[in-house]
Image (cartoon, rainbow, N blue to C red):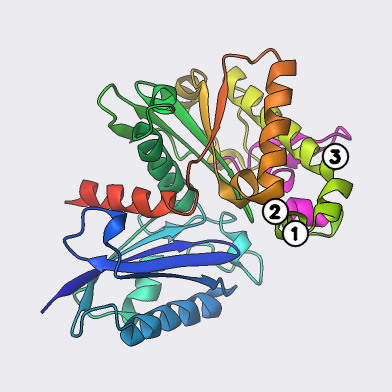
Amino acid sequence: MMSGLLLVDLGGTKTFYGVLPSNATSTDDFYFRKVRETIKGKKGLHQLFSTILDDISKQSKVPSGCHISQVLIACPGRIIDGVISPGSCNNMSIVQGEFDGLDLISFLAPLFAKNTRLTVMNDAEAQMAGGVIECLQDESLSGYVLDQTVGYIGPGTGLGGGFCEVDSKGRLQFITDGHLYDVRMTDSQGSEQKAEDLISGRAFKTITGYSAKQMSDSRDLFLHHIDDISRMGAYIVSLIQLILEGHIFKSLSQNDWPLTDIDKVKGCRTFLLGGSLGTKGYFGEALQTAIQICLDESDLEDVHVVPLPDSDEAPFIGLMRLRESLR
């Protein structure tokens, strides 16, 4: 019987997924790909995966009799052995904390055949891994990541983060858990905030009443709030400064990084910019410009913030890389 590989990129707003042959070596080999609105909450997540499986069964492009033998999921949150750490997946919650301690693999496994292998990784790590690979394949960008310590900042519905070391042969190794959403920062009023409360789609909507998509759909609305976008760019540069100075303190002390990891990321001079806010539409263009202006004004000319070449493709590429590491 023919077997298939299901890739799922869970986001706080949208979920991308697709099926490939189980022996696929490239994201060019998808039978089909699709995007759906993410359904919030644990029940919503269960319903979403049921719908995904229903979609697969109805797809004429998927060979008849093909069964899903492996599922790779990129999911928001701090994930340890498939379990979501407390307070790290609120962007998918209806009630704050409802995903705390959830074993995502055990939760979803009953939807699949008994021998199906499920693996979960943090979505920002998938984005970063895919982004590094995309850069390595582009001669104009490879120098930014090859033989470098690379950071990832991904403002979407929430704030994704990650770090890795890339060796001279393009092999990457993750550093620490990489999460930036709970780094303590100071806002423009001098108050302490979590990074995600300053750098994310949720934060932007709280401040302005509008989503980033609405900004990108309306030029007038975008121009009216350009200062708010520029302020987010300044916050991103402030976050980079904290990282380079080693001033990484979390809102919960139990999530603090080891000093050895903080020392490793202090050497980072390349940050990949991902997420829907960082890469798409008027919003992404304005945010990139604001970041570069702030870098120049902050005497950080040796720091490079590189937008992902394709932020929709990157998580799938990253998941495929994870698959290779599991073999």
| Residue assigned mark 3 | 227
User: Circles 2 and 1: CB distance less than 8 Å?
Assistant: yes
Q: Position of residue 310 (x, y in %)?
A: 48, 47
Query: Which mark lies nearer to you, 2 or 1?
Result: 1
| Residue assigned mark 2 | 201
Left or right, residue 304 beside residue 138: right
Position of 244 relative to 71 (above/below): above
Q: Which mark is residue 211?
A: 1
The magenta-colored residue range is 179-206
Q: Which amino acid does label 3 sit on?
A: Asp
**Residue 255 is inside the magenta segment:** no
Q: Can residue 103 be seen in the rendering of this structure? A: no
Is the residue marked by circle 1 packed among few (<14), some (14-19), or many (20+) residues within 10 Å? Answer: some
**Residue 200 is inside the magenta segment:** yes
Residue at 72% of width from left, 35% of height from top?
A: 233
User: Circles 1 and 3: CB distance less than 8 Å?
Assistant: no
Residue at 85% of width from left, 47% of height from top?
A: 223
Which of the pair 48/4 is nearer the observer? 4
Which of the pair 258/323 is nearer the observer? 323
Image quadrant where residue 50 sits: bottom left
Q: Earlier in the sequence, mark 1 or mark 3?
A: 1
Q: Position of residue 153 (x, y in %)?
A: 57, 39
Which of the pair 42/296 is nearer the observer? 296
